[in-house]
Amino acid sequence: MNFVPALIDEMHPLELKGEVSAEVLGLNEPAARGEQPILAELLVQKEGDDFLVTGWLQTTLSLLCGRCAVWFPWPVRTQVEHLFEAPHPSGIDLTPFIREDILLELPLNAACRLGADGRCPVTGEFYQPRPETSGSLASGEVWEALSKIKTKD
Ligand SMILES: [Zn+2]
């Protein structure tokens, strides 16, 4: 997806609508894949010597759930706003910006969203929320740290 700056003036913004192949993402990681096309609806406006590209991108990535180790869909819809400042090349390729905008929507830790009952929507397995009064190592360490503070007083 690209545009030619010389063909756009203030009075005539350029609408770019269409599908971009998932290949531009180059996303084929052990825990993240991009296979669905990216729907793009962009508007290129000339503002003085600059060009402002706004709109949105939408696709569905596949992520590996860190909790259940199954692939689940990760819908992405992101706003686009890029300013291209003069001087301009004869053609501006938006593909790297589309790639960046989509990849920024990847979560740091992928895990499917559990239902209100703690059920994984993909595997159907139940995950109990950790009880607040559990004697887990973490909370034990917290109490130990607290007791150390108290004995200092
Ligand atoms: Zn899961």
Image (cartoon, rainbow, N blue to C red):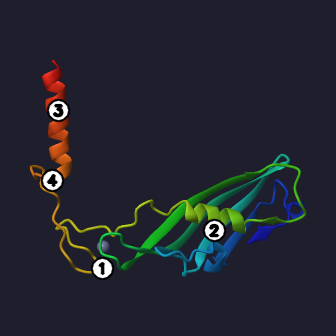
Which residue in the structure is indicated by mark 1? 122
Nearest to the eye among marks 1 and 3: give it.
3
Residue at x 22% of width, y 79% of height = 124
Q: Is residue 9 left or right of residue 54?
A: right
Label 4 environment density (alpha carbons within 10 Å; few <14, some 14–19, many ≥20): few
Q: How many marks?
A: 4
How far is mark 1 from mark 4, CA to CA?
A: 28 Å
In the image, what residue type sits under mark 4?
A: Ser
Circles 3 and 4: CB atoms closer than 8 Å: no
Q: Nearer the viewer, residue 83 or 136?
A: 136
Q: Amino acid at mark 3?
A: Leu
- 97, above or below 40, in the image: above
Q: Position of residue 92 (x, y in %)?
A: 81, 64
From this viewpoint, is residue 21 visible?
no
Tag nearer the camera, 2 or 4: 4
User: Residue drawn 63% across and 62% down?
Assistant: 100
Residue under numbered circle 4: 136
Q: Local crowd at mark 2 within 10 Å, few (<14), some, or many (≥20)?
A: some
Q: Secondary structure at mark 3?
A: helix
Disc 2 to disc 4, how far (Cα)? 49 Å
Q: Is residue 4 left or right of residue 1?
A: right
Q: CA distance from mark 3 to mark 4?
A: 16 Å
Query: In terms of sequence position, does the residue under pointer 2 or pointer 1 come before the other?
Result: 2
Residue 62 or residue 11, whichever sits in front: 62
Q: Earlier in the sequence, mark 2 or mark 3?
A: 2
Q: Which residue is mark 3?
A: 146
Q: Is residue 9 visible in the rendered structure shown here?
A: yes
- Of labels 3 and 4, earlier in sequence is 4
Q: For mark 1, does the 10 Å Cα neighbourhood hold few (<14), some (14 to 19), or many (20 or more) residues?
A: some
